[in-house]
């Protein structure tokens, strides 16, 4: 096409792709597929222990700053999927509930105490806990739902929770925000203690 | 060269016009070509692999993305035509899912493959998915025109996405692409678990 | 003529044989007459190239039996869900008019996007549902290869963003005007000459595109929006043919017109947007096309315009003779 001036459509283009994206999901004719995505998406959100742990990953990433801010949220879904894989394969993993509660406690304390271990250590810690989360929740596929859509919804919801954590953690740039982020970390750790008590008592 | 291109296109057009399409998997009411587009749009597996390959090629720069722009639809079309010829073949869920997870991982790692390797990878993945596409669409009654519609949609999505990724500034935008890759890799890995499970249960 | 060019012409011919056929919007019409409280006589009144009763089968509401084009219903009368098997293939839609003995006529539309009609007895105001009109509009433009080709021709001529905006807006305003004029029955253009002149409008753009390639200028190249407006008036009458076949009751015309028009604009903007995105991508990816490929869209507009002009003028002459 003979256009002399370049079209600066980048923003518009991305907006269009984003607009089309939900349509591609919603356009599914089979109800089973919609339930697949919806139940996968709602699953990580519906459990308070998971929500807190995932937001805490984002918070901690924001506290640690680049590159941890994105390495951790990348490591989490992948190893979580690995945990889900283990669960689906029937590989035994003891103390799942305790592991999940411990993840909230440890990640909360990390944020509260503003601990800054080396990147590899932080990544391994996050990945370790992610396995428990994936193991516990990856395998609860409703009857008749599409496994791919369920998995996709599950991963997307997890990633968005990290994003929420990162955005909250950005408050860390200001003095007041820093205290608020630390307080949030403390809250997560306390909630983790409660989950641990529940897990042990049960 | 030009003659070869022309002849090829004539042959393609002949194939498309000659093959009738009766029933369709997704009926838009707009005809087989649009049904093919719709089929692609609602097939998450197909959509995800195209997005993943586009991100992968886009991260590797203009040349790789340009090659992928032609390689992916062409491989898909050839694979689809072969799949239509042998529609009884298995749909190979493990290999398609593995390639999806692998592509996602390559995006997440921002793997610095050479242009030739990128093209080869795109061709293999595209042909694989195209084959499965052709093999599954044909028994549903979709013909060459539907396949062509799907390939056009793939060309469109792949080209636009890859092109936009090539010009993303270093920093957050490229990291967002890598995060998207990690999500695709994670989805693929969970999916592998689902595929492995029934054999044990 | 080089071998390459000859091959391209073959491609074009192959493509347009399907394109031309695809555009003909075919709408089946069914007439249902109440002959006694529970008995209805029905028949297909208008058919396209293939008789409607060969490809369409009505599925009457539960409790109604069809015998030799007479439907006998139970105490409930003609109420419930009516579907038509085979919609979306040869016929893209069907319109059903129900003539009641003691009530005004009801009109229902069944299309692929609106596969069922809910018949609710004689007192019903009969609304086919707004979604059907929107869908019909999108369908009309998506299958209207000639309209899209005209828009493509305009895209090939316009120079910059501002001119593009003006041109597309002018085209939209113009065809909306005539679409409304035709739908309200203020003016009517017979199909044969209309189709021929729409084809001519596409052919007209061909030489202008060539001028553009040669770096020459012309009135069209300087003011493409004027041309877009003028020919847009023609295309609006073309769009109206898609809507007019519905035979809407007067009360529904404004809503149907609005939604149909919105559907057309959605389809048109999606097309323009898609072309622009692709063009941007080719530039970003530094594609250097062979000149033939670069000019292919222009050749497509010109040759198809010429082909349709000849074809439709022949049809016009035959209808006159």
Image: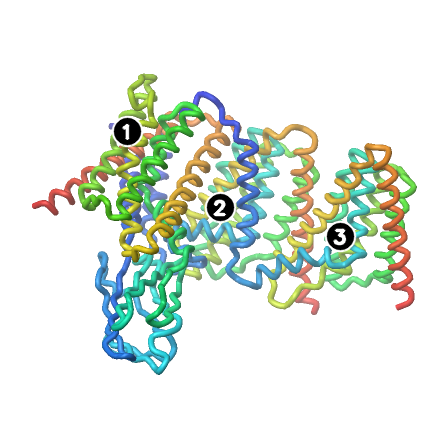
Q: Is residue C272 left or right of residue A166?
A: left
The scheme the figure's colours follow is: rainbow
Provide the residue designation for mark 1: C206
Measured as percent of width and height from the top left, residue C306 is found at: 23, 35
Work out whether residue C114 can be spotted: yes
Up-down relation of residue A18 to residue C253 (above or below): above
Work out whether residue B1 can be spotted: no
Question: Dot 3: few (<14), some (14–19), or many (≥20) neighbours within 10 Å?
Answer: many
Q: Secondary structure at mark 3?
A: helix
Provide the residue designation for mark 3: A80
Of badges 3 and 2, nearer the viewer stands 3
Q: Secondary structure at mark 1?
A: helix
Up-down relation of residue C162 to residue A28 (above or below): above
Measured as percent of width and height from the top left, residue C208 is found at: 29, 25
Q: CA distance from mark 3 to mark 2?
A: 32 Å
Q: Chain of mark 2?
A: B
Name the residue at 70% across, 47% down.
A160
Q: CA distance from mark 1 to mark 3?
A: 58 Å
Q: Quadrant of residue B198?
A: bottom right
A171 and B135: which is toward the camera? A171
Of badges 1 and 3, nearer the viewer stands 1
Q: Chain of mark 1?
A: C
Name the residue at 55% across, 37% down.
B161
Provide the residue designation for mark 2: B76
Please say if the residues under marks 1 and 3 sit with CB atoms less than 8 Å apart: no
């Amino acid at each position: 096409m003979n256009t002399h001036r370049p079209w600066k459509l980048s923003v518009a283009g991305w907006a269009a792709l984003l607009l089309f994206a939900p349509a591609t999901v919603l356009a599914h004719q089979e109800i089973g597929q919609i339930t697949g995505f919806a139940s996968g998406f709602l699953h990580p959100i519906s459990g308070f222990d998971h929500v807190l742990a995932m937001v805490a990953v984002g918070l901690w990433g924001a506290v640690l700053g680049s590159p941890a801010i994105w390495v951790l949220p990348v490591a989490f879904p992948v190893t979580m999927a690995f945990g889900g894989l283990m669960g689906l394969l029937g590989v035994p993993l003891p103390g799942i509930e305790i592991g999940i509660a411990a993840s909230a406690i440890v990640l909360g304390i990390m944020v509260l105490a503003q601990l800054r271990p080396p990147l590899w250590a932080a990544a391994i810690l996050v990945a370790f806990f992610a396995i428990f989360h994936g193991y516990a929740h990856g395998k609860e596929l409703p009857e008749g739902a599409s496994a791919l859509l369920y998995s996709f919804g599950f991963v997307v919801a997890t990633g968005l929770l990290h994003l929420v954590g990162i955005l909250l953690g950005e408050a860390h740039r200001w003095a007041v925000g820093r205290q608020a982020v630390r307080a949030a970390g403390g809250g997560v750790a306390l909630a983790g203690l409660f989950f641990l008590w529940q897990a042990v008592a049960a | 060269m030009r003659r070869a291109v022309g002849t090829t296109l004539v042959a393609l057009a002949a194939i498309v016009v000659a093959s009738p399409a009766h029933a369709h998997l997704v009926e838009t009411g707009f005809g087989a070509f649009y049904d093919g587009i719709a089929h692609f749009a609602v097939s998450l597996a197909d959509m995800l692999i195209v997005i993943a390959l586009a991100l992968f090629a886009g991260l590797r720069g203009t040349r790789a993305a340009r090659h992928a722009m032609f390689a992916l639809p062409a491989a898909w079309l050839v694979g689809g035509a072969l799949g239509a010829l042998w529609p009884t073949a298995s749909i190979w869920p493990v290999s398609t899912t593995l390639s999806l997870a692998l592509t996602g991982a390559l995006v997440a790692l921002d793997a610095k493959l050479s242009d030739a390797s990128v093209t080869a990878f795109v061709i293999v993945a595209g042909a694989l998915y195209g084959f499965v596409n052709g093999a599954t669409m044909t028994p549903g009654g979709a013909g060459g025109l539907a396949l062509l519609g799907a390939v056009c949609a793939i060309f469109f999505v792949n080209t636009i996405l890859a092109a936009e990724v090539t010009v993303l500034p270093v920093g957050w935008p490229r990291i967002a692409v890598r995060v998207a890759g990690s999500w695709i890799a994670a989805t693929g890995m969970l999916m592998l678990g689902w595929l492995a499970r029934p054999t044990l249960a | 003529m080089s071998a390459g060019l000859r091959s391209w012409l073959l491609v074009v011919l192959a493509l347009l044989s399907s394109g031309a056929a695809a555009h003909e919007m075919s709408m089946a019409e069914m007439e249902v007459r109440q002959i006694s409280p529970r008995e209805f006589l029905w028949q297909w009144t208008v058919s396209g190239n293939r008789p409607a009763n060969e490809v369409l089968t009505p599925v009457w509401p539960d409790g109604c039996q069809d015998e030799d084009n007479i439907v006998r219903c139970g105490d409930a009368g003609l109420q419930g869900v009516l579907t038509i098997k085979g919609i979306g293939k040869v016929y893209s839609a069907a319109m059903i008019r129900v003539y009641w003995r003691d009530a005004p006529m009801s009109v229902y539309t069944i299309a692929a996007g609106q596969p069922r009609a809910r018949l609710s007895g004689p007192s019903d105001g009969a609304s086919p549902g707004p979604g059907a009109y929107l869908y019909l509009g999108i369908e009309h433009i998506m299958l209207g290869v000639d309209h899209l080709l005209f828009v493509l021709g305009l895209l090939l001529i316009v120079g910059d963003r501002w001119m593009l905006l003006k041109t597309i807006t002018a085209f939209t305003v113009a065809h909306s005007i005539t679409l409304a004029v035709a739908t309200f029955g203020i003016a009517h253009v017979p199909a044969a000459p209309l189709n021929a002149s729409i084809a001519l409008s596409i052919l007209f753009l061909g030489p202008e595109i060539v001028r553009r390639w040669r770096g020459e200028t012309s009135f069209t190249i300087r003011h493409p929006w004027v041309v877009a407006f003028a020919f847009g008036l023609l295309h609006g009458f073309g769009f109206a043919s898609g809507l007019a076949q519905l035979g809407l009751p007067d009360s529904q015309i404004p809503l149907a017109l609005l939604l149909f028009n919105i559907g057309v604009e959605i389809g048109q903007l999606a097309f323009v947007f898609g072309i622009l995105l692709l063009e941007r991508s080719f530039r970003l990816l530094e594609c250097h096309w062979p000149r033939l490929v670069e000019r292919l869209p222009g050749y497509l507009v010109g040759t198809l315009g010429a082909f349709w002009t000849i074809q439709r003028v022949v049809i016009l002459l035959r209808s006159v003779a």
